Image (cartoon, rainbow, N blue to C red):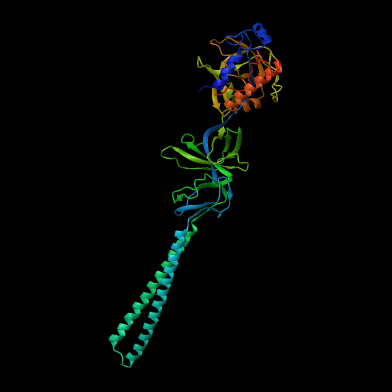
Amino acid sequence: MTSSRFPGVLLAVLLVVSGCGSSEEGESGRRGGRGGPGSGSTPSVEAVQARYGSLPLQERMSGRVQARNQVAIYPEVGAPVVAVEVQTGDYVEEGDPLVRLKDDTYQERVRQAEAALRVARADVRSARSNLKDLRAQLKRAERLAEQDFQSQQELESLRAEVEGAEAAVERAKAQASQAEATLEERKADLRRTVVRAPIDGYVGARNVEVGERVDGSTRLYTMGDLDSVKVQVQVTDRMFGKIQEGQTARIRLPSQDTTLVSSVTRMSPFLADASYSAEAEIVVPNEDRLLNPGMFVEVDVAYGESERATIVPLSAIYEDPTTGARGVFVAPTLGSEVSVEPPDSYDEQDPPPPTNPTPTTFRRVDVRAEGAQTAGVRGIEPGDWVVTVGQNLLSTTGEERVDARVRPLPWSRLLSLQRMQDTDLLRRFMDRQQRLAEQRFGNGDSTETDTTVSSPQDG
């Protein structure tokens, strides 16, 4: 893994300006020892003091944002669209109309179902009347049969007719119930010609126009509650046993240079057959609307701590492009032979002054653990001053020392710079060079630039 963290275009600019310096720096470079490679000037770099401690172990994953209760809206019936009631971005409440469909066909079906129900109910009344008449005839026949005025055969025939009439009543009642159900179904279809919001929330992704014919396969909108969103991440089988519910999750928005803190809300116990990964879900309050559905974000989930070691910024770790050696540049005389105080804060308009030329050497390190912005290493001691910006100005083919002017930085400044995007690094670098030129020469052309760059390597 390459630890040089300068974006390519910024590195090119640095190489151009590294040969430019004040005459004072040039003289001090010749007096103080070897300067930058291929240059008689003394390079300027930036450094922080290494610390001792443990690193939070974390896994970085890519997450996708979804709104809470995010749903796609489809019509339940097919018909042409006659009105679109809401637009993308509108807030609606449950039951509010979204789209109206042409309903004349469905109204006609309701009228037909109502007529069929009236016929069925009339059939029930007719069947009941017939049954009543036959039952009366049966009673008279039974009385006559007791007096031997009615034959037994005629009596049995009347009883069979009554049973048939009772069955006819039941059949008519069933047909009436069926007609009622058909009517309710037709009324429901008529109501469905008005597509309504199933939940409270915001409407988006409109995909419907007046005059368009839609059916159950046509997505009209996507809607959801944006006050709270969920970030879905895929946990690989390697991390499956480490990521658990309740662990701290930091959601980073690169476009806004913002980090939100939440926790793992849910974790699937199953690995997918195709991807060998499980889905984890992080619910995040979103009152400020920083997260929008469909966004991809970086998610760091903390799952433990590393062993204690010397802690340095990731930007301090440098991999020599010619030898492949991995290590850090240290300024061993800072704090002992050269007095320097670690700054508590940083002001871009009035940064800490660089030291006089002091030796820097390259030391190989063993990276024991690596976090989002820092690494735990073996090979240097806590308190050593490690170069975080300008290593390319110090790299040589041998191991001889390179004198440099070192500007001390606070950790807070360095870590904030590491979070910056490449374009921000270049823009701030160029802005600073412009300010320096204007301070020294007004608005005229500058023949002298500061080789210190207040930005970390990008790696």
Q: Is residue 132 left or right of residue 245?
A: left
Looking at the rendered image, the quarter that the C terminus falls into is: top right
Where does residue 387 sit, x and y in percent of width and height? 61, 18
Question: Residue 14, can we see it?
Answer: yes
Q: Nearer the viewer, residue 375 or 70?
A: 70
- In the rendered structure, the answer to whether residue 349 lies left or right of residue 97 reads right
Q: Who's the residue at 31% across and 92% down the image?
A: 149
Pick the residue in front: 81 or 146: 81
Give the image quarter of residue 34.
Answer: top right
Image point (45%, 63%), residue name: 110
Q: Is residue 328 visible?
A: no
Percent position of residue 89, x then y: 57, 45
Q: Is residue 43 above or below residue 181?
A: above
Frontmost residue, 109 versus 181:
109
The residue lying furthest to the top in this view is 31
**In the figure, 156 relative to 214: above or below?**
below
* Displayed quadrant of residue 433: top right
On the image, which quarter does residue 342 sit in? top right
Q: Viewer-proximal residue, 295 or 448? A: 448
Residue 391 point in image, percent of width and height: 58, 17
Q: Total marks drawn?
A: 0
Furthest residue toward front: 211
Q: Position of residue 150 (x, y in %)?
A: 30, 90
Residue 177's place in the image compared with 89, above or below, is below
Q: Residue at x 29, y 87 (%)?
A: 152
